[in-house]
Structures are given as structure tokens and as C-alpha cells.
Amino acid sequence: MIELNNLPNEVENDSNHSKDRDATSEIYKKLANIVGEERVSESNLDRLLYSHDLAPLPKEISLAFKTVPDIVVKPRDATDVSRIMEYAVKNNVPVTPRGGATWAFGGVVPAFGGIVLDMGSMQEILEINKENLFVTVEPGVNWKKLYDTLLNKDLLIGAYPSSAPGASVGGWVNTGGVGVGSYKYGGINQLIRSLEVVLSDGTIITTGCKNVLNNSSGYNLTDLFIGSEGTLGIITKVILKVFPAPEEIRPTSFVFLDLEEAGKAIHALTRTNITPYHIAFLDGAHFDLLRELGKNAPKVGAMVNIIFGGDSKIIDIQEKATEKIMAKYGAKKATKEFADHEWAERFFESRARRLGPGLLVGESFCPVSQIVEMSKRSQDVLKKLKMKGAVVGIIADPNTVLFMTYAISNEHKLIKSMASMALVKKLTDEAFKVGGRPGGFGLLFSGNLKKIHGKGVFVMDDIKSTLDPHYIMNPGKLIESTTRFGIPIPGFAMAVGMNILAIMKRMMPADKTVMKNHETK
């Protein structure tokens, strides 16, 4: 339920939220002429709904950024997007592409208003090619739908996000995601054959080759757009590799006394030739929150879920070898029924947000050799900030852990909600200390880019300036952080601000969950 006193400044004074602000405005007429009136909205309510993603942003952030778009457009195809971009560049209107909005870093939230392109309107699976093992999809295709469709045709998509029921293909490409299946098949950057992209001037390009590898064929344009957070172009088509479906996908679960022993076991497993399909871990606090939510969750110190995929006889061998490794660190193997349940629950790791009613997620990567240390540091951050949350994550490859530490938040409490945003900053600091990096930049954390790439950031800026000379492609993200008034926010200034929020959060009372009767209002 949206409360009127929480509306951003741009819309809070208009009581008619279903009526268009000005259906005869020039931008409305031009864009409606391109895609049709039914695909364009200036409704205050629609604009408000497009001003946030998974993470709640306090309305006061609109003092620095214009997070409410001026208009929302739902294109039908690349031609629509091309014509929209031609209009936008001619009139210097910012354009923010939006997928499923299941990320929590504000990447799809406008910094300067303008046009939000809802790419969820383009959600067709265009071609499934079993002969050459690829699938061609539009960017709004849902990952869960794609996974199920391919599996019914005895094909497997290599990897997909844990937020698959709500996440879009284009969104995950733009964030350079790793997820379920990445341990065996790689992240999204290793699973794409080619992209169709609309540039800022409306030019439509193809970046790769759909039937074969794209190596040794000039500059790798595909990788240029992966993880660019929509700052270089609008992805309108994705060609993904697919694989023959395995004979069996077999989940296994192991219970540990604490996350430290679980981390040691995971590290040992990754130093063998055993190659599971997926490895995930969850600390005991995650299950505590599920029980508070009213779910039948076990009381454990930590859980490691290891999923095997392939020939059943080979899985038998790998499973036995894995059991020995896990047992060495005190693990007890859970029943098959429990493991199957955990596998079915892989899409719902964020369900504890109902206790909030919001959720903050801090994504960070670190070496597998530092998994125990980063686990301790993540739990310590939650404790120091007095936040109720949990440390969960996946193993992205044999030397990379993706931590997705989360905390319950309540955006209805303004000061505490703003102070809680320091969680992401503090988790990022800890990741850097153990040789890792943050998992995303979005609206507030572009200052971290230089810490990772050093002078390489200047090369990125040159690329941005070349492909988007008018700076209208999701401006204010990734390589820059600028207020709605054109004032740059230096990385150190943002860091100081986040540290102040962290100090404030430590001084406040400990967080408590809001939902008491386990029902959503």
C-alpha cells in the first residue's frame, strides 16, 4: 500500500493519481505517435511506481536526484526504441531502460527524470535452435519462463538469477549477473552469443555471431554492453547459448554448526575436480527469519546446498566424494526430501522482506580463500549496524564467492531507513579489505568504480562519451554520480556521507521486524 505522505515531491501535491498530467504535452504526443497511446503514460501513479526498484528509496532522495520519470514508454520492438532514441537525443531527454527491477541498487531508477523505457513490454522467445544450441529472446523475457520452456524441450539455460521469477533477461545482462548454474557454466558474460543494441542516436547494431564463437573477430562489442547498466545502449535482443538438458539434476544439502565450518568445507570442495552445477550457502539467521515469518524452517548454524547436474552415474561418484569433504568439517547430510525442498526454495531467498516491509541487499565478490573471513565480517557489519538480516551467497566459480548479505528495513521510518543504506557501503568496504569488490554500482555507488579499475575508468569515460555524446543513456550511473542540478558527487564525498549514516545507525535502537501476524496488508 502506497501512503500519500511518502510520495516524492514531484507527485505528492496531485490528488488525482490515475489521470494524465498533461495528455497533450509535446513529449506525450511524439512518443504516442511512435508506439501508440496505450503504450505511453504520464500518470502520476505510474510514474511513482517506476521511481524505485527492489530496494526502497526514501522520498528525500528526490532532493538530490529526480527519481520520478516524466513519462513511461513501453516499446514493441527495436524500431520503436530506435525512433524513441532519435527523439530523445534531438531533444536532450534522459532515457532509463528498465527490466524486472529485481536489483537493489537503483540502476533502473532515473537520476534526472526523463523517459523510462519499460523493456518488459518486449517478452517474446523468438527462436529456439536445437541444431546450433542457441535461443533468441527479447529483453523482457522472464528467466523462470525461459528456464521452464527450454527444459520442456530437453535444453538447459546455463545460468540464471535467483530472482528468476521476476527478473528479466535484459536486466541481468545489464548487471553482468552470476547466479544459479554459474559455477559450472559461467556468468551471463560467458553465455551470450550476440546482442542487438540500439545506440543513443537510434542506430541498431548486432554485436556478435549467433552460430559460433565471437573470438578473433575484432573488438568484443558484446562484452562492452554486458554489465554497462544501460549507460551505453538499449538491449533489444539477446542470443543465448543453450545446452542439452542433463539426465538428472540432484540437490543435496549439508547442515553445519556455523558458517565458519561451512566456509572451510566449501573452500576444500572448490580445490578438487568435482564440478557441481550450483553451490549456495545460508547462515542460521536466514532460517531464524523464516521461522519468524511463520515458515517451517530448521534450526541450524549454517546450510550448504550443493546441486549436481549430468549423468546419474557420474553424479553418484561426485556426491560420495563431496560427502566425505563435508563430513570432514562436521557436516550432517540432510534428507533427500529436505534437499529437494531447499532446491525448490532457491527463488525465494528474499521472502523475509515481508518482515520489514523492505529489504536491503549488499552484493560483494571475494576470493573463495577468504570466504570464512568475509562471512565473519558480514555478520559483524549487521551486528554493528544493529540490523536484522542474514549472510547468504553462492559460489560463482572455483575462486569467486558472491555474498548477497541482506537486512530487513522499514522505509516508513525515514531517518532509520536512510541510515540503513550504509549497510551496502560497509559491506563493500569489507570486500575491498579481503581482496574483493562490490557487486554493483547503480544510483549511489559509482565512486567504487575507480577503486576497482584505477585509470581504466578514464578509458570507460571515453567509451561513454563516444557512444553517448549527449549523456542521455541512464545518466548519473556507473561512471558518474551527479545531482539533478548538475553538481558532481565525488566518490569520497559519497563515502563520507555513507559513513555518517553508519554512525547514525549505530546510535539508534536495534531494528525490529514489523510484521507480527505473518500476513501482508
Image (cartoon, grey):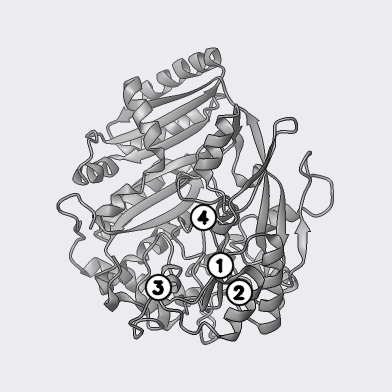
Tally of marks: 4
Could you say whether the residue bearing mark 2 is in a helix, strand or loop? Answer: helix
The reply to whether residue 330 is in sight is: no
Instruction: Indicate the amino acid at tag 3.
Output: Leu
Q: CA distance from mark 3 to mark 4?
A: 37 Å
- Pick whichever, 108 or 278, lies toward us: 108
N-term mark: 1 or 2: 2
N-term mark: 2 or 4: 2
The answer to whether 496 appears left or right of 40 in the picture is left
The answer to whether 361 appears left or right of 205 in the picture is left
The numbered dot on residue 437 is 4
Could you say whether the residue bearing mark 1 is in a helix, strand or loop? Answer: helix
Instruction: Indicate the amino acid at tag 4.
Output: Arg
Farthest residue, direction left? 517
Q: CA distance from mark 2 to mark 4?
A: 43 Å
Instruction: Indicate the amino acid at tag 2.
Output: Ala
Q: Which residue is denoted by mark 1 in the rendering?
A: 39
Residues at badges 1 and 2 in contact (C-beta under 8 Å)? yes
